[in-house]
Image (cartoon, rainbow, N blue to C red):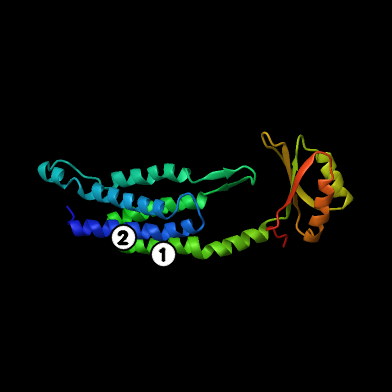
Amino acid sequence: MLPTWEIAVRLLLAAALGGVIGFDRERHTWAAGLRTHMLVCLGAALAMIVSAFAFSDALHNWPSVVLDPSRIAAQVISGIGFLGAGTIMFMQRENVVRGLTTAAGLWTVAAIGLAIGGGMYAAAVIATAVAWVILAVLKPLERRFAMRKTLPQVRVGFAGRASLAAIEQVLAGRNLPASTIVTRHIPDDGDEVTVEFARGFERSALGELSDALRGLPGVATVSLDISARGG
């Protein structure tokens, strides 16, 4: 059995390293933030300590008993998926999935906690540093790359059924290079049409286009994706 001070060091270190990862998620106001990551890392470390050292009396009293410390650790790795799934959301209006990075962070934090519980301090600290770089340092680069490859979009909300023929007529009349046109029905809110333009589209034409689309019959809202870049 580990001495009490060693158990305390491992649990406190797990909470601290989990907090390093959780702090970045907290800054972005995700569902799983600072306290969630600290608790996951702390719980994983405790599970590893229990798995590796809690059955020493049984091994001493019954020499025929064989201990496999990895069994509880394996259950932690698979079980953390349920918690991670709770952070993943499908944003219907944006038609995107959010929370995958947070879920992956929880899974990584659980592994860090297992490493600390097993006494692999160096591995846990190195993994925490690498995870923090991935989450905090690479985020601006990822956002900049995503903005460059995102194409300009216009969303048209109809009070009832969408008229694709009218939208295509407006685009053809202005010789605008539309790439894709997607129609989605939103319950109790009519149809929504998303028009994505091909590269080379002049953003200066978005204002004039939105005015023309707003004048179509049945159009309730017209929104522009101002964060997109066509370059």
Q: Residue at x 51, y 45 (%)?
A: 88
Task: Identify the residue at image location x=15%, y=43%.
Answer: 58
**Circle 1: residue type:** Ala
Relative to 161, 80 lies left or right: left
Return the residue at label 1: 129
Q: In the rendered structure, which amino acid carries the disc numbered 2?
A: Leu
Tell me if 95 is positioned left or right of 32 in this view: right
SS at mark 1 in the image:
helix
The x, y position of residue 34, in whole percent, is 42, 55
2 left or right, relative to 43:
left
Q: Earlier in the sequence, mark 1 or mark 2?
A: 2
Quarter of the view holding residue 118? bottom left
Quadrant housing residue 230 = bottom right
Between circles 1 and 2, the one closer to the viewer is 2
Q: Label 2: state its secondary structure.
A: helix
Which residue is outermost to the left?
61
Residue 60 vs 142, above or below: the answer is above
Left or right placement of residue 135 versus residue 41 in this view: right
Residue receiving disc 2: 13
Could you say where residue 57 lies in the image, as x and y percent from the top left?
A: 13, 45
> What is the x, y in percent for residue 113?
34, 54
28 or 105, which lies in front? 28
Residues at marks 1 and 2, CA–CA distance in whole angstroms: 14 Å
